[in-house]
Image (spheres, helix red, strand yellow):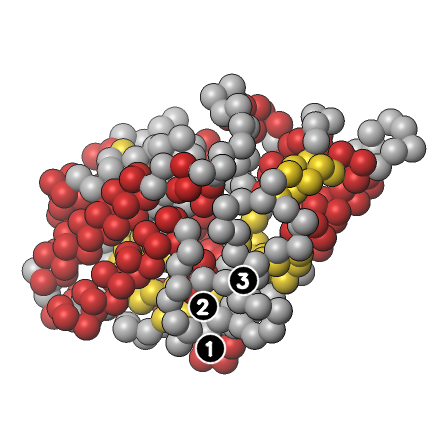
Amino acid sequence: MAIALDQRLHLSQSIGMKILITGGAGFIGSAVVRHFSRGCGFGVINLDKLTYAGNLSSVEPVSNLPNYIFEHHDICDEAAVDRIFRAHAPDAVIHLAAESHVDRSIDGPAPFLETNVKGTFTLLECARSYWCGLPDSARDKFRFLHVSTDEVYGALGAEGQFTENSQYRPNSPYAASKAAADHFARAWYHTYGLPVIVTNCSNNYGPFQFPEKMIPTMILAGLEGRQLPVYGDGKNIRDWLHVEDHAAALYCILTKGVPGEVYNIGGEAERQNIEVVESICEVLDSLIPNGSSASYRDLIHFVSDRPGHDYRYSVSCDKLKNELGWTPSRSFEEGLIQTISWYLENRDWWRSIQKRYDGRRQGLG
């Protein structure tokens, strides 16, 4: 039986540390909500606008816990965000709400400016107002964890890695909007003293990912016998981070990280895009043979490249490993098998999305 909001508010008083998580119905956000509410036992306030990529079924495993509350609002709505701070009195914020698909940003950049820049500004201002009114002991403990992407750094050649000191050179509208948000977050630390920590992560994968992103796109296309569309020559390189390892890293940073610092989070799993697709085909061949001697590789189809497609991303997480003691818990091969198995076992989840998402390619400019 669902617990009423007023009962949840009363119960939350005895839970201890409470975290306001924005974008908690999205892919990464839902993993963070599940990790903090179920795995860590923290009180969680999930603030989400429920855009096309938001899905409350992704947090269904924790939705009836007494330490979980959902607030359906836009982070650009200052009055709503201010009320949420006053009503729930969080001890920390993990800010994940964002428009995140590069292809969509190419076709329509305006929502990325609205949510990623204006929304972050609004959240920072409401957090600052709330933080300034806290008692000294609570002010000292409060944290604002701003979650960003390695794409703000631009593209790498064949060698080297991004570090926390790398220059920002965003190349897509999405990356530019996240870079602007990062700069606002840092400015609110240096100008106003708001205890902000910034993280920049590599490409995430795992369960509950909306099927516009590469790995679920390939899994679902393979299961349905459709072509597997690979951009360009498939040799662009990304570092892959399992979303549950990302959630664990954010817990580590929230509890051990230093305000004003930046921490890069990577999976230490660089792969060419074509290598990832071929690995998906191998796992599908093993788990669900297509009934003939043919391999899912036969479905691979090269298509025109994404405009301005960055060649390579790779982040060094030495600072996070050496200073805070975090490392990825699984290899890419292990995580990929787990991910594909999840999509095989949860067909109802993605089939319900397909009723409103046609999978049509975007980002052709």
Q: Amino acid at mark 1?
A: Lys
User: Circle 3: is it few (<14), some (14-19), or many (20+) Cα within 10 Å?
Assistant: many
Q: Amino acid at mark 2?
A: Asn
Question: In the drawing, what numbered circle is on residue 313?
Answer: 3
Do labels 3 and 2 touch, CB within 8 Å?
no
Ranked by sequence position, the earlier of labels 1 and 2 is 2
Location of residue 310 in the rendering, given as x and y in whole percent from the top left corner? 52, 56
Location of residue 113 in the rendering, given as x and y in whole percent from the top left corner? 28, 45
Tell me the CA gap for discs 1 and 2: 8 Å
Ranked by sequence position, the earlier of labels 3 and 2 is 2
| Mark 2 secondary-structure assignment | strand
Q: Quadrant of residue 262?
A: bottom left
| Mark 1 secondary-structure assignment | helix
Tell me the CA gap for discs 1 and 3: 17 Å
| Mark 3 secondary-structure assignment | loop
User: Circle 2: is it few (<14), some (14-19), or many (20+) Cα within 10 Å?
Assistant: many
Do labels 1 and 2 touch, CB within 8 Å?
yes
Left or right: residue 329 versus residue 334 is left
Tell me the CA gap for discs 3 and 2: 12 Å
Image position of 126 with respect to 7: above or below: below
Residue topped by disc 1:
319
Residue topped by disc 2:
264
Location of residue 156 in the rendering, given as x and y in whole percent from the top left corner? 53, 67
Say which residue appears at 45% left-offset and 38% top-offset: 365
Image position of 360 with respect to 188: above or below: above
Left or right: residue 338 versus residue 202 is right
Asked if one can make out residue 257 in the rendered structure from this viewpoint, the answer is: yes
Q: Amino acid at mark 3?
A: Tyr
Asked if one can make out residue 10 in the rendered structure from this viewpoint, the answer is: no
Please name whichever residue, 117 or 260, is drawn nearer the observer in this view of the structure: 117
Say which residue appears at 50% left-offset and 80% top-offset: 322
